[in-house]
Image (cartoon, rainbow, N blue to C red):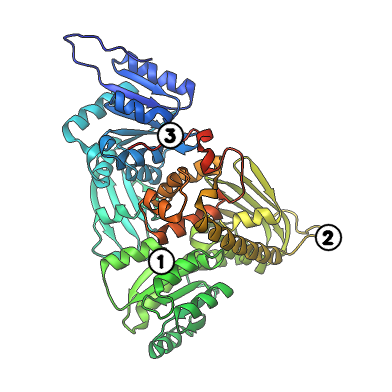
Amino acid sequence: MTSDTVESAEPVAARILLVDDDLGARTELGNQLVMGGFDVRSLPDPTALQRTLGEWRPNLLILDELFPGTTGREVSLRLRAQGATFDIPVVGLLSEPSIPRALQWLRSGATDLWTRGTAFDPVERTQALLDELSQTRVHAADVRARLVAYARRRTLHGTVLFYPDTPFEGRVRFEFGALVSSRTGAALEGTSLDELLALDDAAARWVPGDEVVAVSGPPGGSYRPKVLVVEDDDALRGLLLKQLASYGTVEGAADGLEGLLKGTRQDFDVVVADLNLPGLDGWGLLRQLRQHTTAREAAIIVLSAHDELRETLKAARAGARAYLKKTGRAKPLLDTLERVLAPRKQAWDSLARREPTALDLRLVGPMWALRTIAELDLVGALAIEEPLGRFEVRVAHGQLVRAEAQLGVERLEGPGALEALLSSSGGGAFTPGGASEAPQDAPWLHELVEGAAKAASASLATRLRAALAHPRQLSVHPELSLLFARIATERELKVLSALRQAPDSVAALCEASGISYEEVEVVLAELLRRGVLSAAPVPGLTGLQREATGEPPVES
């Protein structure tokens, strides 16, 4: 497919490098571009990409979404981090169109995104993009500039929500391709669009058209939440406990260690924690709770004597659901509690009425959903989908009829499926109906869920200690790692990419990924929880055997 360079008075054809492991799709797209007058080279995977870029610098690099052993986003991130390849424009080939997914690619350095199977003229689109880039050089600019340019090309009309349905919620509004507004909730007031876009682990949702997105209000209902208040000031802790007494079941803890002990031994809907705590500060408490199988589902509201935007952004990235300045007044805290608890209250009331109920596990938590279904003595099926797979749990009056999980090509049943579901952040629904009687020997759902949670917590703690001690011995699951990479944050992608280089210590892993020890620990816990990493040796998966995966070496 390569076009030889011939001395001519005609302008030199623009060079296009196409990397796609689908031979048929690569051939079809490459031939179209050649017929359009472009000089095209193609590769089946990124193994020889660095060498090709050095020998033949393209004007445009088109990257497939997934390859054996790596992803297009990982490749784009590596190119973006290297001076020699920083400003090579990257176009990502996506299988499914999604504005949140496009945002992830733009953060990873992509300039434009094309969707397979959609009707467009690749020659016309390529030429238009090259003409634009020759004038604006937006491909070498920051993510904000690339997003604005992408929105203009696609004539986007709608709103991007960051941290939807939380006090951190930010909204970026586009009208027919033009960026018209950017604002955030009170918790992030003063945040610029650049800072908002830098929150690469923020949940994002696209609301198309002119639909008005209402903020969830107090849902009322009969659900009584459990709240843990972690505050070392006795007077303030007593005041908060008194203010929240009529709201639900409330307990207190005088320091971070006591808060961690209570937060991991009991099931709380919300943890309200001071940042400046003795023993274990609020940041450490937040990090530890986020690594626990069940405690990580609690919505965490952090309290601080300061009202600093940088600290607020740090809390959002660390997984807090809200950030409040200490005032001693009850209303701001109660209003915030209503906001963060709205998804659980609404789901509880709907399930209690035996109605079909949509469930977003990022907001309500898989453990909470399963416990609620058991507690309400429901009959029906819970179906959850996410990029890593699908889950179905059928119940009848508190007893488990069937539990199944499909993770890539792996199929799990019973307790194994429930344990896998506990790590999910997908979405779906509970649908009432079906057989009202369980088999005579059917186990109780709440007992299985409790057992699965304890097993998952104990296993994760052991595996995380081993991973931190010997990261070189970790195995990367080829299929799940690629599926996970489609939704991974930039930090998770960097750690995953660094692990493929078989680092011999956590210090080497931190250096290779460019992130701190604390962040690496959090990412490793998530990768282990999702089954992307394993301590068990699997042929062709270990870092020492990464050549078998086709992962390209990182060249300087």
Q: Nearer the viewer, mark 2 or mark 3?
A: 3
Q: Relative to residue 27, is residue 66 depicted above or below?
A: below
Is disc 3 placed on a helix, strand or loop? loop
The amino acid marked with disc number 1 is: Ala
Distance between mark 1 and mark 3 Cα atoms? 36 Å
Residue drawn at x 20%, y 35% is 137
Horizontally, residue 89 falls left or right of residue 297, namely: left
The amino acid marked with disc number 2 is: Gln
Is disc 2 placed on a helix, strand or loop? loop
Residue marked by disc 3? 552
Residue marked by disc 1? 320
Mark 1 vs 2, N-terminal side = 1
Q: Relative to residue 260, is residue 294 depicted above or below?
A: above
Q: How many marks?
A: 3
Mark 1 vs 3, N-terminal side = 1
Is disc 1 placed on a helix, strand or loop? loop
**Residue 296 in sight in this render:** yes
Residue marked by disc 2? 440
Q: Residue furthest bottom?
A: 235
Distance between mark 1 and mark 2 Cα atoms? 43 Å
Q: Quadrant of residue 124?
A: top left
Image coords of residue 273 (percent x, y)? 42, 76
Residue drawn at x 32%, y 38% is 556
